[in-house]
Amino acid sequence: MNQSEIVYALAALCFLLGFVALLLQKRYVDTQTNQPTEIELPLVGKLKSNFPALVFVVVGAFLAYAAWSSPPDQGDEQWTITGSFLPPKGETVNWQEGTLAILPKTFDSVELQDGRFEIQGSIPKGKKFEDVVTAIIYSKDNVSAQINVADEYKKFVAGKQSLLKSCDDNSREYAPETVDSFQ
């Protein structure tokens, strides 16, 4: 049983105890005034009721909210992203002089070897590469290229032409992309 399940079990127990106490309808009397206990709740107002039952219900609601609002860390999965860039026709590019960047910087940049890249990094379990990274960018003095990973993934899933060649649970392979040349 993990931590969230324990907190949910405690929350359910508190709700159950509060519900039973409300069904029994016992009123708690203040020993000094011989009047039913009266409490004031923000946004609700004054209540003359069985205070312990309300405490159980409020504590149960708080525990359930606390467990729900902070899901447990599921750990990370190792991902591998591969692809390549091609030089413009009639030009040569010294790939090592340029910069390969992943946006946002969740993965470490890697050097290109003959235009090919392999990026490895960790992504939280339950998330896809496209949930964490928006673009892969290569730039050098007069050449640049960009792969918008979410757009390419949507095209791939829709069966349209995409730079994404293959898509597995923990990897992506992109088709060669020609870099743009500018003056």
Image (cartoon, rainbow, N blue to C red):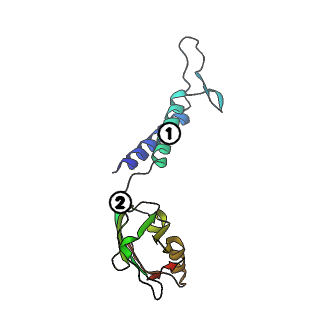
- Nearest the camera: 119 or 122? 119
The local crowd at label 2, few if under 14, some if 14 to 19, many if 20 or more residues have their Cα within 10 Å, is: few
Residue extending farthest to the bottom is 90
| Disc 1 element | helix
In the image, farthest residue toward the top: 32
At 55% across and 35% down in the image, what residue appears? 22
Left or right of residue 1: residue 166 = right
Mark sitting earlier along the chain (1/2): 1
Viewer-side label of 1, 2? 2
**Residue to which mark 1 is pinned:** 62
Residue 123 in the figure: left or right of residue 150: left
- Is 25 on the left-hand or right-hand side of 72? right
Counting from the top left corner in percent of width and height, residue 67 is at 45, 46
Q: Position of residue 126 (x, y in %)?
A: 42, 63
Q: Which mark is residue 144?
A: none
On residue 76, the disc is: 2
In x, y percent, where is residue 65?
50, 44
* Circle 2: residue type: Asp
Packing grade of label 1 (10 A; few <14, some 14-19, many >=20) is few
